[in-house]
Amino acid sequence: MCGIVGYTGSKNATSILIEGLETLAYRGYDSAGIAVWDGENIVMKKEKGQLSNLKSILEAEPVFGNSGIGHTRWATHGEPSYINSHPHGDDKKQLVLVHNGIIENYVRLKNMLINKGCHFVSDTDTEVIAQLVGDLYSGEPLKAITEAIRMLEGSFAVAIMFRDDPHRIYCVCKDSPMVVGFGKSGAHIASDIPAMLAYTRDVTFMGDKQIAVLSPDGIAFYNEFGNPIDKGCTHIDWDLDSAKKGSYEHYMMKEICEEPTAFRKTAEQYVSFKEPRLKADCFPWTAEDIPNVKRIRILGCGTAYHAGLLGKKYFAELAKIPVEIEIASEFRYSDYTFEDGEVLLLISQSGETADTIAAMRMAKSAGIPTVAVCNVIGSTIAREADDVLFTYAGPEIAVAATKSYLTQVAVLFLAALRLGQLRGTVSDERISSLLSQLAYIPSSMEKLIDAREEIQYFASREFSAKHVFFIGRGIDSALSMEAALKLKEVSYIHSEAYAAGELKHGTIALIEDGTLVIALATQRHLASKTESNIEEVRVRGANVLAVTNGSLPSIDSHCSKVWRIEETNELLAPFCAIIPLQLFAYYMAVQKGCSVDKPRNLAKSVTVE
Ligand code: AGP
């Protein structure tokens, strides 16, 4: 989705804005622009396509100044074009602004403004905000902004510069993320933390309809009525390098290689490995809560939903509690009636996914307790959920979620274990044995990552595949959903996951000579069943690759290739099995020359519906 940056201070704004936009490029965009006060005018430069196009324009026609705003646009209203790119201004040339989000009543507002004589130049809903604030402006920015936000419906994060006072930047947001921070040389705004990490780690997350006024000397905050408010700041301990690509060709590979560390860091927050034991205080439930926890409902989107599929297996197996899972975008428009004793478990890496936020707010207004599994401190979901189980994956820049998925699954496993402990459904001996085995997972992952050339070689032979099917049973079936999503999103190869036993109810009709089928077989009690399914597709011509541990000694005879993971408890097998599958998706995409970190049509953080 769109990225916003802003800066006012003593340094050259243009380079800070471009650097910030480059950091936010992972969010996905199709045009970019900046507006900088050059001492006489607010100079706007914008261009369709990659940031490099905008940079070429700035090289030919440099702009210098100490305050400015910038934007990468992901088109929602109006095609990607110069005219539709941000910043936008008003007819009277009093202001410029950039916007992320969707204004739902923009047609009505646009007609109202046209009737008042405004001339629109773009097809965007954003220009409506610019014209509206311009129409309401009579020398008092705060007054115009507070009046405008009362009229706007939908979601917005907006940064505005007024020509009358160009060293101040006004920001306001609703249902769309925005973070502000004050560094040594001035004040910054951004849609996401990594864009300002080079300048400050003490940041403030904007709340709904709150207004921040940035000046070279500091940041002041106001509520939606324009009254001053105090807002604290949050210290972010992500280091600068964690948001940089370093020597890696792609963020996706860097982030896969970071998985053992991310896993270790996350697990250590919830487990004391010395004894080993769960750190009881780190989980949302106490013994007194248990009679009131009768059902877990898991919600998320995309990869987060897939992590939830594994979470469902863990809660059912370890805590023996009824557990449901639903896609957040479906749930929010269903006729669901919440029941007493339900706990809503929301999974979101970014904490800003619009559908997951909406589902959380539905539950909260029904008085249902909400627990979030989230990677970003200070994000909307992290702020609003009753409890948060943080993942410690560090910033994830590649659009394809890898380390966030792994750490979400780790947290769900540990939360299920804790609930099982409190409900008396899992013995202390079993907990201790599982945690002891968990401690070895990062080194098993490292071995798989070190052996990645084998996967690269396999991908170099298979990258022309048109269709790939992933099959598995139980936990492997849940994992195969994520493996299929990873492959399709980065390599654009049609891939589907099927519960292995479901194949012969229809899908097996698609298997023909040479079809690539990836079979996951890590669950000993289901191994012989999966083996039969592998044989069913093999005899129909499929080229079968298996990802397995020692649970199927005879598997080599059915498959053209086998990737082995180290032996561990079956519940822990996904932590290792996902590594070769993510690497496979990565190498297939690289072989095909795809844009690995920013796949077409996708955005990292889906902040609009
Ligand atoms: C997967 O690789 C995607 N990045 C996507 O499915 C993602 O998991 C989904 O949009 C949810 O994002 P969230 O975890 O930030 O809520």
Image (tube, rainbow, N blue to C red):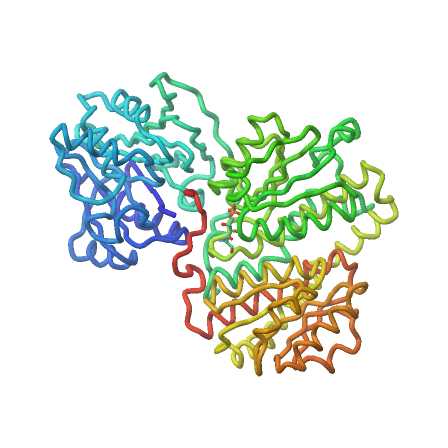
Residue 81: give x, y in percent of width and height. 23, 53
Residue 151 position by quadrant = top left
Towards the viewer: 168 or 140: 140
Q: Is residue 499 left or right of residue 73?
A: right
When the figure is inspected, residue 214 is found, relative to residue 79, above or below; the finding is: above
Residue 184 position by quadrant = top left
Q: Quadrant of the C terminus?
A: top left
Q: How many marks?
A: 0
- Toward the front, the furthest residue is 505
Q: Is residue 55 left or right of residue 431?
A: left
Towards the viewer: 47 or 370: 370
Q: Is residue 247 visible?
A: no
Residue 458: give x, y in percent of width and height. 57, 78
Residue 80: give x, y in percent of width and height. 26, 53
Q: Is residue 411 left or right of residue 487?
A: right
Residue 418 position by quadrant = top right
Towards the viewer: 325 or 360: 325
Q: Is residue 121 visible?
A: yes
Q: Is residue 405 left or right of residue 410?
A: left
Q: Residue at x 59, y 45 (%)?
A: 326
Residue 172: give x, y in percent of width and height. 35, 30
